[in-house]
Amino acid sequence: VQLQASGGGLVQPGGSLRLSCVTSGFRMANYHIGWFRQVPGKEREGVSCIHRSDGSTTYADSVKDRFTISKSNVKNTAYLEMNSLKPEDTAVYYCAASTNVLYFDLNPSRYTIWGQGTLVTVSS
């Protein structure tokens, strides 16, 4: 059971990146998938999540209208398209999976399977 996040890198303010999260060892269609980010010394912050069955999405206010989450159950891959990036978006980004059918939100404690993280740096 594994998630592998990739796609991070250095980008200038206003630029774009697309993160990918490849899952293995489980059927992604059975899990809510979330993206989170963390800056050293700060708590992990929920960025966006996508519902396992109906594909509905939730975004943190700080990324709404700039980031888009999507997934392909066929490819067992989730994506986070990030546009209009700002220096404050700099963080390690993690993808995670949750089977909690009672909740669909950005609370990290709901998510039980985590990837290793990919670093996004927004700087000129």
Image: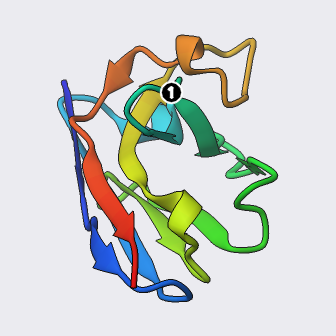
Q: Quadrant of residue 116?
A: top left
Residue found at x 65% / y 21%: 107
Residue found at x 32% / y 27%: 114
**Which part of the image, by quadrant, shows the N terminus?**
top left
Q: Is residue 49 left or right of residue 78?
A: right
Residue 4 visible at all: yes
Residue found at x 41% / y 50%: 91
Question: Can you say whether 23 is above or below 32 in the image?
Answer: below
Q: Position of residue 43 (x, y in %)?
A: 53, 23
Q: Is residue 108 or residue 113 the one in the foreground?
A: 108
Describe the element under mark 1 as helix, strand or loop: loop
Q: Tell me if mark 1 has few (under 14), some (14-19) or many (20+) residues whose alpha carbon lies within 10 angstroms of its own.
A: few
Q: Is residue 44 or residue 81 the one in the foreground?
A: 44
Q: Is residue 82 or residue 86 the one in the foreground?
A: 86
Q: Is residue 68 left or right of residue 79?
A: right
Residue 52 visible at all: no
Residue that badge 1 annotates: 42
Amino acid type, residue under disc 1 in the picture: Lys
Q: Position of residue 16 (x, y in %)?
A: 47, 84
Residue found at x 60% / y 14%: 100
